[in-house]
Image (tube, rainbow, N blue to C red):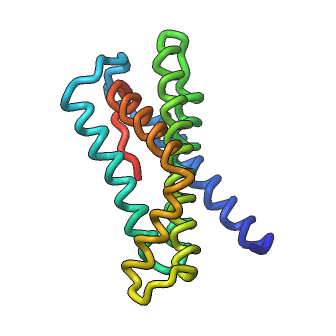
Amino acid sequence: MSRTIIKWWSIVAILLFIIAMMVGLFNSDNVNHLITFPTADSLITAMKNGLRIIIIYLILSFIPVSWPTKTVCFISTAIVFSGIGSIIAGFSFNHTVNALVSIIFNINYLILVYTIATISIQTINNVKYQSNHHYILKWFNSLKHSLGSTWCPLIVTMVIYFILMAITPIPVTPF
């Protein structure tokens, strides 16, 4: 990747970060900032969002090029950094525990996106080395091979994601 492309993507990421910061600073909605005990509804919502993330990356891994996966990963990373920035900008000592839980949630989401993107890109790269003639079978064998070494971190980060999203008071809609 050339320096010019990296420079332009960095400028776009900084602009997205600034826009997210401004929206976060001037948004005056009354959100309940208390950490709650996870209920059945909040756990189901967290599982739906987590499965939606996995399905998006599985669909992207079915495409034989990796740039769509990298683009979604870039956007998700920008969202996480803007979320952490808005938490830091709006930090108050009255809500220290909430801020820490939200930062841990964002870091866990970043690790989750990295893990799923790694699986997706490994699947895309390994499809060409499979011996079957049908693309779906090649893709499935490549996915099994990619999950072989990364299934444990994926499960751990998904469980942490479910729990933290269920107790996080801020409405989170991941990409």
Residue 175 is situated, as x and y percent measured from the top left of the image, at 41, 53
Outermost bottom residue: 133
Residue at image coords 62%, 61%: 12
Residue 169 is situated, as x and y percent measured from the top left of the image, at 35, 25
Outermost top residue: 94
Classify 96 as above or below 29: above
Which sits in the foreground, 138 or 110? 138
Outermost right residue: 3
Residue at image coords 53%, 16%: 92
Outermost left residue: 41
Residue at image coords 69%, 67%: 8
Residue at image coords 48%, 39%: 157
Q: Along the horizontal axis of the image, is 174 left or right of 19?
A: left
Residue 9 is situated, as x and y percent measured from the top left of the image, at 66, 64
Which sits in the foreground, 64 or 36? 64
Q: Residue 43 is drawn in which quadrant? A: top left
Q: Along the horizontal axis of the image, is 82 left or right of 29?
A: right
Which sits in the foreground, 7 or 111? 111
Classify 60 as above or below 154: below
Q: Along the horizontal axis of the image, is 47 left or right of 98?
A: left
Please count the marks in the image.
0
Classify 94 as above or below 31: above
Which sits in the foreground, 10 or 72? 72
* Quadrant that contains the N terminus: bottom right
Residue 34 is situated, as x and y percent measured from the top left of the image, at 35, 16
